[in-house]
Amino acid sequence: MLTFDITHNDHCRRLESFLRTLMPSASPGYCRKLIKNGAAKLNAAAATPDTLLAVNDRVTLKESAATASLISPTRPALDCLYEDDLVAMVNKPAGLPMHRTAEQEANLVDEGMAYMAWRGTPCKLYPVNRLDRGTSGAVILAKSSSAAGMYGRHVKETGLDKLYLALVVGIPDESGVIAEPLDDKESETRYQILLHGEGNALLAVTPISGRMHQIRRHLEMIGHPVLGDKRYGMGELSDYDGFALHSFRTVVVRPEAGPLTVCAPLPDGFWGLAQRYLGQPPEAVIARLDTCLAGGGAGA
């Protein structure tokens, strides 16, 4: 039996996604099969692919030649949070643009297609939603133009239920609603403090509307910009590729399959920022985050 203990780096990750970090070359259905037939268990009990992991959970895998041959000592280049025949939801690193730029630098779409080809399931990828270059976290990539159109229409009509985490300058009120118009359009952002240090705070943020740079602009308007946000804040972070804003939880409705909750674990660098600016270990952040999630998120 192979045993893996869950740390803060995989807190709230789906069980299937965790198995795929262990076996990046496995076909999309292989990990689901392991869970379904009981070869993969969570805390010695049966689970589902969508079960969200927590710190100190234990995942066990029945040892076999096939599984052993697929386990990799390194994590995959693409952190895939969820995948089916239509879409892949991935955890975008901070500092990585969504698309190819004039400088021909690395970008999420090209890296995603390279990974799919390496795995033996080549496809063209189309972003359904987007994150700014400096923002990390969950994004949806469709595997065809028709899937992109279908999901894109859904997002435009109903939006995405998203929860962000933001490290900000200063300490705002414990919770609040920012309803300042953006680009002459009604806009609303809700937030609550999870933790704070002497001069910075970690917020759970829910954008109710979907304006460009909404969270960053709204937080700057109330005098608490996101750390590292050069455009709407106070300059870059010297040891972090982007700014301290992370798309943590996304609830998406799949055609004929119902709602799915996907969480994107925080990047290593974000944990380091929390330690430095809040003086808090990962365990404290996770405890407050779990309380927030249990209560329905920011402003619930």
Image (cartoon, helix red, strand yellow):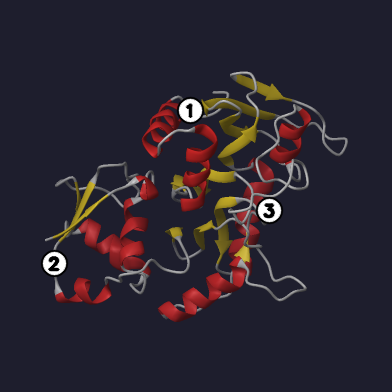
In the displayed structure image, the side of residue 297 where residue 227 appears, left or right: right
Residue position for label 3: 132
In the displayed structure image, the side of residue 120 where residue 38 appears, left or right: left
Q: Earlier in the sequence, mark 1 or mark 2?
A: 2
Residue position for label 2: 63
Residue type highlighted by circle 1: Gly
Secondary structure found at label 2? loop
How busy is the neighbourhood of tag 3: few (under 14 within 10 Å), some, or many (20 plus)? some
Residue position for label 1: 296
Residue type highlighted by circle 2: Glu
For residue 96, above or below residue 219? below
Query: Distance between the Cα atoms at labels 1 and 2?
Result: 38 Å
Query: Distance between the Cα atoms at labels 1 and 3?
Result: 25 Å
Q: Earlier in the sequence, mark 1 or mark 3?
A: 3
Q: Give the position of the N terminus as an image quadrant.
A: bottom left
Q: Residue drawn at (57%, 54%), measured in percent from left and top? A: 139
Q: Residue drawn at (32%, 41%), measured in percent from left and top? A: 54
Q: Quadrant of residue 80?
A: bottom left
